[in-house]
Each structure stands twice: as structure tokens, then as C-alpha cells.
Amino acid sequence: MKKVLVIAGPTAVGKTALSIQLAKKFGGEIISGDSMQIYRRLDIGTAKITEQEKEAIPHHLIDICDIGDRYSVADFQKQGRQKIAEIYNRGNLPILAGGTGLYIQSLLYDYQLGASEKEQDDTIRHKYETFAQEEGPQALFDLLQKRDPIAAEKIHINNQRKLVRALEVLEITGESIAAPKKIPEKLYDSFMIGLTTERSVLYERINERVDRMLQNGLIEEAKLVGTYPDSQAAKGIGYKEFCPYFAGEKTLAETAETIKQNSRRYAKRQLTWFNNRMSFHWFDLLADPQAMATIKNEVAQWLEVYNG
């Protein structure tokens, strides 16, 4: 399997700086695993790496979308795997760095995102929707209970959409929608570096980062995002909090505090997600001066196994 070095962790913990150091040492190219850095013109609120900070290291999947564009996990999965192949063909090491857990997981494992075409049939779905309208929810539920009692145990009688979906999948595939799915296979030989630090230190760094963003022009960037109110970008932390401010309902100080609070909560969710979903080698670069040397040694050993 191809080798992929992964650097993940919560916001404001030092992923960007580490990715540059390791890319320089091991001949790497960096693939961003961040769901907000894909947007052009959104640099401040996304803490996007600058050209100077890149130190001439190639970066991928940054600035690939306009603010109003839709971009899915499936898009990232497809493009990320393509970038890994291209980097390998150049003889370099792919380094996946970012904090969007689902992006990272979907890229490294053989996840089938969304229903495949073979599991969807508009004609069959319409048949069961019509049945539900004519016969009522109890009849629809009874039909599923008769044909797929396992699924019927898990779906409420009033959830027509799921009842219809279960009958649709059963008729097309012959399998219950509630049947255990195949465990996704790992597609790459990945060395997983997780960065963390003491909660109080992390929260202080987040607060300081938000203050710097405001000083560097976050308000103007948020105004720009506000012209795309229905976009995915408008739901991002650092942008959505400005709606009450622009409406005159909150002060700038209140808005800043809300951004900090939401960012801290997001960091907590990131740590929980990474701890529960994936297996990392955890390091605290902020508290342990020797951690950098340890990381470089362990990555070197991992690569020697491959090269040897």
C-alpha cells in the first residue's frame, strides 16, 4: 500500500508548522484536510497558510472552490486520492494535514459515501410513496414489518421517508437496510500523528487566534461571505457569528466572544472525534520540546520499513 503521513488534531494546535517541517525533511507534498480552506478569498477566518509560510512546499486542495460552490466529502475523497497518486508518481511523500475528521477518514478508508446508483430507483420509491399516501402510515409500516422485520424494529412508524427508503433498498438489492455493513478497508499505509495539548493552553491559543483574525480583517471577509447566505461557507465558524452583528443585534465584543466559544467547542468535538474514530500517535509539541525529534525519528523508522 502507498504510504500516507497524516497530521491531525484540533484547531490552533500547530498542525501547519509541523506539516512544513516534515515535508521539508522527508520530501513531502501537503494535502489539506480542511473543509473551509477549499474556498478562495477566505484566508483569515480559515487560518489558511500563506505563501511565505509554505516555504515552497507544494500544497493541494486549497483555494479550489468559489465561495458559493457546493463541495462534498465525496468530492474530497475523489480528489484527495487523485492527489495521493500524483504525488507518488513524482516520487514524493503525501502528507495529509487538517482537522476535518470525516475528510481524513473518508480518504484513508474504503468508505462508500451516499447511496450507490444500484440502491436507488425513482420508480420504486414513487411506488411506495404513493402506497403511503393512499393507504396511510400504518399500512406502510406493516408492509415493511412483513418484508423486513429487522429494519421495522429500527424505524418509527411516522418516519415515512425512512420506511420508503428501507422498502426501496430491499426491493432493489434484496438486502435489509439495517443489515450490518462491511467494515471499510484501509487503503493506505498511514502513520497517524495527532497533535494535542492541555485544554487551558489550547483554549488560550484559540482566543488569541480569534483576536488576531479580527485585527487582520476578519470583519471584511465575513461581509463577503454574507453575500452568499445560502452557501456552505456561510455556516463556518468565524463567519456565521457575524449575522447578528451586521444586523445591529450584537456588539463586536459579543461577536468575538461567540466566535471564541464556538471555536473552543469545535476543538473539543475534534478531539473527541479523533479519539473515538481513529488511532493516532499523540504528541504535545507545545509542552514537550523533545516531541519534534521523537516524531521525526518515528516517521523515519516507518519510512525505512517501506524503503527497506
Image (tube, helix red, strand yellow):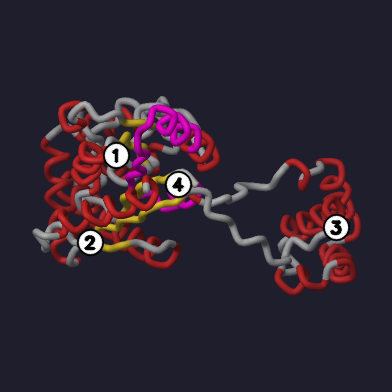
Point out the tag, 4 or 2, that comes first from the N-terminus: 4
- Which one is in front, 221 or 92? 92
Select label 1 or label 4 by which is in front. 4
Residue 297 in the image: x percent, y percent?
22, 55
Residue type (three-letter) at the residue carrying disc 1: Ala
- Which one is in front, 48 or 264? 48
**On the picture, is 288 further left or further right than 76?**
left
**Would you say residue 248 is visible in this rendering?**
no
- Residue 84 within the magenta-colored segment of the rendering: yes
Q: Which residue is mark 1?
A: 247
Check contact, mark 1 vs mark 2: CB within 8 A.
no
Point out the tag, 3 or 2, that comes first from the N-terminus: 3
Local packing at callout 3 (Cα closer than 10 Å; few below 14, some 14-19, many 20+) is few
Structural distance between the alpha carbons of marks 1 and 2: 43 Å
**Image mark for residue 174:** 3
Point out the tag, 3 or 1, that comes first from the N-terminus: 3
Tell me which segment is drawn in magenta: 81-106
Q: Which residue is mark 4?
A: 103
Looking at the rendered structure, the secondary structure element under dot 3 is: loop
Structural distance between the alpha carbons of marks 3 and 1: 53 Å
Q: Which residue is mark 2?
A: 283
Residue type (three-letter) at the residue carrying disc 3: Gly
